[in-house]
Image (cartoon, rainbow, N blue to C red):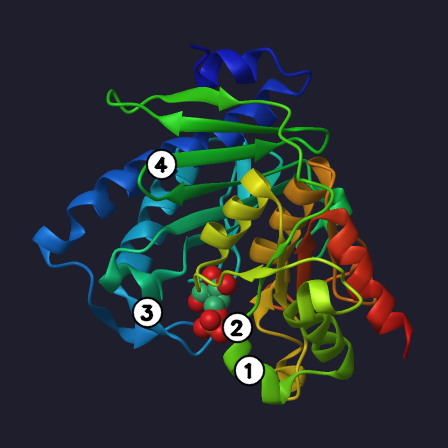
Amino acid sequence: MTNLAQWLAAQPVDPKLASVVATMAAASAEIAAVLRLAPIAGQTGLAGHTNVQGEAQKALDVISNDIVLNHIGENPAISILVSEELDEAVHFENQGGFMVATDPLDGSSNLDVNVTVGTIFSVLDAAGGLLQKGSAQLAAGYAAYGPATSLVLTFGQSVAVFTLDAAGQFVLTLDQVRVAVSSGEYAINTARERFWDAATKGYVDENVAGETGPAGKRYNMRWVGSMVADIHRILMRGGIFMYPLDSETVSKGGRLRLLYEANPMALIVEAAGGGATTGRERILELLPTGIHQRVPVILGSAEEVARVEGWYAKG
Ligand code: P6P
């Protein structure tokens, strides 16, 4: 089987860019090892402080961020780190030209119940500054710490999936992954229905009506509460993930963060043939206003994303 180093060496990209992806893969493998034993080490609890998002940090949020920091500090090609867990960007003096934006441990509220969580990352040219459109990303990826540890990578043209083997190496298990164009599965937190806008309500109501309504087919609903888990399912079998702007999140711009959640996932899903929108705009065209900016996120099977955009276009 092809391992990650062999696959990276065969990619038509700057070897230094490939080294940045390898660094995040190594950090993810180390995080996976920590997570596997965390309940025994008593590390699934709270860290006792909150992050810039105002969210209670889990001990593993801090540990995962430290692991990423250590690996990035050892790669001279990386000069900037933006992390969900750090208020400000970290600048590494005398280091190369890439910026990494990451959510070191996404979905950590699921750790106590042993549900899949992940590490999400985006790679950009540091020369472009902290606030670049997602379309400027040079690479993106995520690790999904589930029954197996999957690593999903793109340089923008195609999507590859690696699996962590018993020796701690990532081996290629899927290549040229495509998101199913159509699907009968959607992911949204339906407990938020009372906050939804008309477009979200209209789209979801059509899905609930299934074969008895305009959608003309039965739908199923899945919501893990861990973006990496939901997106990986959509990448593997199609579907749509929705965290739309609603009357409660509108004051913050949305729920999920643009630089290290929406943008990397959008690059991956679009590279696999899916769509990624706020409902009104392509996510990858958004010009960030801050490193922790939040945005609405709707992404997945092209036909489903188009249907949601159609609802937003009704005004
Ligand atoms: P809710 C996890 O906290 C997260 O940022 C994403 O991973 C996940 O999709 C979402 O929030 C879950 O949101 O409303 O279900 O708590």
> Which amino acid does the dot numbered 1 rest on?
Arg
Q: Residue furthest front?
A: 212
Name the residue located 70 percent from the left edge and 62 percent from the top edge. Answer: 211
Q: Secondary structure at mark 3?
A: strand
**Quick check: marks 4 and 3 in contact, CB under 8 Å?**
no
Q: CA separation, marks 4 and 3?
A: 23 Å
- Which of the marked residues, 4 or 3, is nearer the chain's N terminus? 3
**Quick check: marks 2 and 1 in contact, CB under 8 Å?**
yes
Q: Secondary structure at mark 4?
A: strand
Answer whether residue 296 is visible to the viewer in this image.
no
Badge 2 density bin: few <14, some 14–19, many ≥20, Cα 10 Å = some
Q: CA separation, marks 3 and 1?
A: 23 Å
Label number found at residue 189: 2
Q: Secondary structure at mark 2?
A: loop
Residue 286 on image: x %, y %: 78, 60
Look at the picture and state if 207 lies above or below 236: below
Query: In front: mark 1 or mark 4?
Result: 1
